[in-house]
Amino acid sequence: MQKDIYIRAACQISAQPPLSEEWLDAPVRYSEPYVRAMDPDYKRYLEPNVARRLGKLLKRAVLTARRVMEASGVACPDAIITGTGLGCIENTGVFLNALVREGEELLKPTSFMQSTHNTISSLIAIDARCHGYNSTYAHKGISFECALLDGYLQLKAGEASTVLVGAHDEMTPEYFVLLKRAGYLGGAPGGFGGETAVSMMLGRQRAGSLCRLRGVEIAYRPSADEAGRILNGLLQASRCSLDAVDAVMIGTNGHPRNDAVYAEMCPVLFPGKPLLRYKHLFGESYTAPGLGVYAAATVLHRQRIPGHLFVHAPGEAPRNIHNILFYNQFEGKNHSFILLSSCGE
Amino acid sequence: MQGGIFVTGAGILSAIGKNKQETLGALRERRTGIGPLRYLNTSHTEFPVGEVQWSNEEMCRILQIPDTAVTTRTSLMGLIAAREALDQAALPDKRAPRVALISGTTVGGMDKSEQYYLDFLENDTRNAYIAAHDCGACTEMIADYFGIFSTVETLSTACSSAANAILLGAMLLREGRVDAAVVGGCECITKFHLNGFNTLMILDREPCKPFDACRAGLNLGEGAAYLVLETAASARRRGVTPLCRLSGAANTSDAFHQTASSPDGEGAYQSMAGALAAAGLAPEEIDYINAHGTGTVNNDLSEGIAIQRVFGPRIPPVSSTKAFTGHTTSAAGGVEAVISILALRENFIPANLRFSNPIQELAFTPATGDEAVGTLRHVLSNSFGFGGNNTSLLFSKIE
Amino acid sequence: MDELILNLKREIIEVLNLEEVKPEEIADDAPLFGEGLGLDSIDALELIVLMEKNYGIKLTDPAQGRELFKSIRVLADYIRENRKK
C-alpha cells in the first residue's frame, strides 16, 4: 500500500484574491490594521437554499471544501476535520449581544444553532452527505495543526484514505476590538488582523498533488531543548536532515511579542536557514497557520519562492525546492512543526 | 483495534456527585441531581437543571486557587475531575513522561463572557477574561495548574466533544505519540446555551423523561469528567491497576441536519456498529448501553431506531443517565464514560429514571435498574452532538 | 393583496433570508413547509419568534406552530384572531 501522504489540493478565501493563487505574483498589500476577507460572489457558487441561512464563515467553508473535493476528485472524504479558534464568532456575537442587551426573550434560534464550533465540519458533511469521521479542534493558535495532525494520523493508521482538513476563522469588527484589548492583535505597524478560510484534501495519490506531508508535531510549553528534540525526531522519522530543508516558513506578523519568540527560537532551531513568512499576505488569525501551510504547499508545487515571502532578502533563492519546514508558535506556549516536501521527494 | 488501550484513572464531577464514590452512591440509590436553579443567574427559573453543588468560590478553595485568579466555572470543574483521574492513575510519573491533556468543551469561558461582554466592548477592566473566553483557554487553565502536559488539545464537537477527546487520546497512544493521555471534557451551564436550547424549544419544564412516550425535552446539566488512558504495556511498567479497557470507538456523521437527528438514526447506527467492529465484538456480547438519551422527542426516537437496527431483537439493557445528571453537553461523553465504567466494574445497570410510558414506535423499553444481570463484560456509551457528530465508545472488562 | 398578508410575507422573507423570493411569488394557500417554500424545523422556530415579536402571540409548543404555518392564509387568520400587538 502507498504509505506516503500528500496534500492533493487546497483552496482559500482570505485577504488575498479568493479561490486563486494570485498572491504569488501580485500580492495585495495592506497598511490598515484590520482586513476582512475578499469574498467571491457566493450566488455564483452556492444554491440559494444552501446559502440563505449561512453566515460568511460557513459560506467560505462550504465553498472552499467543495472546490478541493472537486479538484481532487473526491466526492465524499473519509474524514472531515476543521480547526477553528473561535468558531462562528459572528453568530455567537449576534446571540450574545441580544442576550446581554435585550435580555433572555425573543432570541433567535438560527444564530445559536450556528454559533457552535462544530457547525463548520458538520455543515460540510451535510452538504456532501458524508457519514464518515467528523471532528473539530478549537485550540487557540494551533487549532489548525491539531486538525492536520488528526488527519495525518487517520491516514497513517489506515483509518482513512482521504481527509478534508480546514482552517476557518472570521474576524468581526467587534472581535477585532476584543482581540486588540487582549493584546493578541495590533501590537505594531505592518501586521493586520485577518480572516482565514482554507480547505485542503489529504490523500495517498501522488499524481497531481501539491506536495507531500511528511509529518506533523505539536508541543505544549516545550523548553528550547525539548523543541529541538521534537524537531529532530520529526526530521529523523521523515529520513530528512536539517541540511536538506530549503527554507523554514514562520508566523512573524509585526507584533513585538509574537515576533520575539521567533527571534529567539529560529537561530537555535534552524541556524542560517532562509526564513519565509505568510502573514504579510493573510494577516493574523487563530487559524492563519492553515494559510501558511497552503502557501508552502503552493510554493512546493510551483517550484518557485516569490521574493515577497522571504523574511530577509535572500542572497540567492534556492533553485530546486525540495523541503519546506513550517514552524508556528502561539504566545510562546503552543508550538508546531510540519514538514512538507515536493512530490518528487 | 483499540485492544491495547487501558483506562487507569477516572474522575467525575456532576450534579449527582463530586467524585466517583458519590456518583456511584447516587446511581445505586436512584438519587437524581435535577432540581431548581441555584447557581446560574438567569430569568429562566422555570427550567430544572443539574448543577454541580459547589460555587466557584468553593471550588477555588478546594483547589487552593486564589479567588482573584482568572478562572471560569468550566475550567474549575475540569480541574477537580482531572485531579481525581490523575491521582487514581498515579500521575505524574517519570516512567510516563509524555502526557497529553485532551479536553472537550464548547462554551469554554462563556460564563464570564456573558457577564462581562459590555465591558469587553467598552473598556479594559475585563481583558483577562477576553483571553479566557475560547475553548483552548479553558484547557490551558487545566494544563497550567498541573504543569505536566507535553501535548494539549481541545476538541469541540458540541455534545460529543468529550467522547471525541477519548477517541483522540487512544489514537495518540496507538501511534506512540504520548505515554499517557488525560481525556474527557468539562462544561458549565451558561445563560448562553440555556437560552439557545430554549430557542430550539427542547428544554423540559419538568425533570426530563428519556425514552418515555411523554418526554418533552432535556434538562441542562453541567460537570466534568476525565479518564487516564495508557497502553497496557505502560500500565504494567508503572504497576498501576487498570479499571478497564477502551476496547472500541467510532466517530461518524449523521449528515442530516444542523440540529435534528435523522429519522433512521443513520449516524448513530454507524457509530455503534463502528465501535463494535473496532472492538471485534458481536452485538449480543454487549451487556449494557448507556444511551445519549437526551429526552427530546427527536433524539430518543432516532437513537432508539438506531439501537434496534444494530441489536435486532436482542437489545441489551439501555438507559439514559441524563435523568440523573441532566445533559452535561460537551462533558457528557466523559461523564457517561465514567458512569459506564462504574456500571461495568460494579456489575449493575443504572436505572432510566422517570420512565413510565413506552414509545410506540420502539420495540424496547429502557432499563428499570432492577434487571438481573450477572457480570457485565462490555458496555457501550453513546454521545451525539448537534450537526450529527456521533461517537460511540466501548469499555470492556480486562480478562 | 390583504395588508396583513403582504406584511407577513415581507416579514417572513426578511427573517428567513429568502432573498430570491418576492412577496407575490408566495401563494396565500401554498404550504410553507416541505413542498412550497421548502422551509424546515429551524424556520418554524424563527417564525415562532416572529409571531411573538411582531404580534405578541406566544407559542410554547412547536407542534402548534406546525399547524399554523400550513399556509400564509391560515397564519394570517390566526394572527387576526389572537394578536396582542
Image: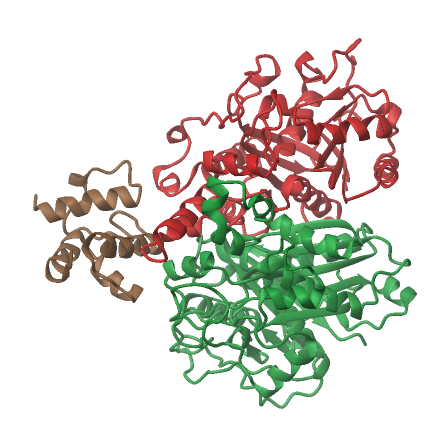
Residue B92 drawn above or below residue A231: below
| Residue at 81% over, 52% down | B178
Any idea which chain is the green one in this picture?
A: B
Image location of residue A323, percent across then percent down:
79, 25
Q: Quadrant of the N terminus of chain A?
A: top right
Kindly indicate the quadrant of the structure image that contains residue B93: bottom right
Kindly indicate the quadrant of the structure image that contains residue A152: top right
From where the camera sits, is residue B379 visible?
no
C57 to the left or right of A187: left
| Residue at 67% over, 66% down | B61
Image location of residue A77, percent across then percent down:
59, 43
| Residue at 46% over, 33% down | A173
Image location of residue A254, percent across then percent down:
65, 24
| Residue at 55% over, 63% down | B269
Image location of residue B149, percent across then percent down:
78, 52
Residue A7 drawn above or below residue B291: above
Q: Quadrant of the C terminus of chain A?
A: top right
Outermost residue to the top: A315
Q: Nearer the viewer, residue A98 or A236?
A: A98
Figure coloring: by chain
Any idea which chain is the red one in this picture?
A: A
Residue C14 drawn above or below residue B33: above
From where the camera sits, is residue A233 visible?
yes
Q: How many marks?
A: 0
B355 to the left or right of A6: left
Q: Nearer the viewer, residue A192 or A212?
A: A192
Residue B169 drawn above or below residue B9: above
What hue represents chain C?
Answer: brown
